[in-house]
Image (cartoon, helix red, strand yellow):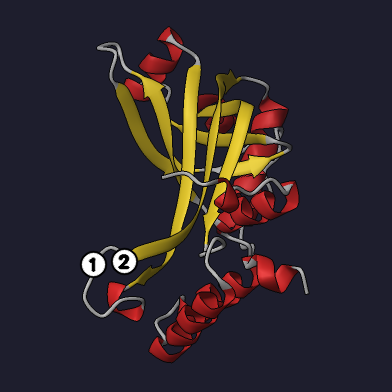
Amino acid sequence: MRRKEFDVSEAEEIERFLAEMSFGFLGTIGEDGYPHMTPLNFVYKDGAFYMHGARAGQKMKNLRADERVTFAVAKEYALIPSYWLDPALACPATAFFKSVFARGTAVVVEDIAEKADAFEAFMRKLQPEGGYDPFSPDHPQYAKELKAVAMIKIVVAELTAKFKFGQNWPEVRTEHVAGALEQRGRPLDPETAELMRRYCPHHRSE
């Protein structure tokens, strides 16, 4: 269920999340009318999503037939067991997460300079330690690859985000679950507890 308390409108916060994530799901319209989902790496740059792949294949066939697409990115932070909130009922069990959903049109990028910029953004994101020659349209070893590989750009028409961390809970429940997360100590539990407190309206108003 979507609740407005979880919606996120701050552009910088959304961009930070997208910069942290490297994987998402591209939705295209299949020739049979069913949605077709393709998992792939992406980079978000200058307000657009970029992804690359072969020039042939189902997703490219779908894009040539209909340029309308969706793109979704999500990260689950923590599962909250029901017994933290109720000793018997299963209903309180939930999950905390961040997600971004985009609707727009897909463009196959043919401009070599733009493709090189996008690939360089991919490398900075996925291999920030360097160790490679920067992408350039006139690099003798990259020129052929830049022409051969398809680069898809999603021109965003609508971008929405949903960050769920118990924002609609009373403060006492927030503190109880945040404390339980810190005690449990799974890899993302301390970060989840911090995010709960950051997004909690009680803490923000102080």
Q: Residue at x 46, y 79 (%)?
A: 177
Q: Position of residue 87 (x, y in %)?
A: 26, 80
Dot 2 alpha-carbon crowd within 10 angstroms: few under 14, some 14 to 19, many 20 or more = some
Question: Which residue corresponds to the image point at 59% horizontal and 47% vertical from the top-left?
Answer: 7
In the image, residue 111 above or below residue 169:
above
Task: Indicate left or right for 79 with 99 as reference.
Answer: left
On-image quarter of the C terminus: bottom right
Circle 1: element type: loop
Check disc 1 and give the amino acid type. Answer: Ala
In the rendered image, the residue lying farthest to the bottom is 183
Q: Where is residue 167 in the image (x, y as percent from the top left)?
A: 57, 62
Q: In which quarter of the image is residue 151?
A: top right
Quadrant for residue 137, please give it. Answer: top right
User: Identity of the amino acid at label 2?
Assistant: Ala
Image quarter hosting the N terminus: top left
Q: Is residue 158 visible?
A: yes
Question: Which residue lies under the disc numbered 1?
Answer: 90
Mark linked to residue 28: none
Given residues 88 and 46, the one toward you in this image is: 88
Q: Quadrant of residue 131?
A: bottom right
Q: Is mark 2 on a helix, strand or loop?
A: loop
Q: Name the residue under label 2.
A: 93
Give the camera-side residue of 30 and 111. 30
**Is residue 193 shown above or below 65?**
below
User: In the rendered structure, are the residues bearing label 2 and label 1 in contact, judged by CB atoms less than 8 Å apart?
Assistant: yes
Q: Sort mark 1 into few (<14), some (14-19) or many (20+) by Cα contacts within 10 Å.
A: few
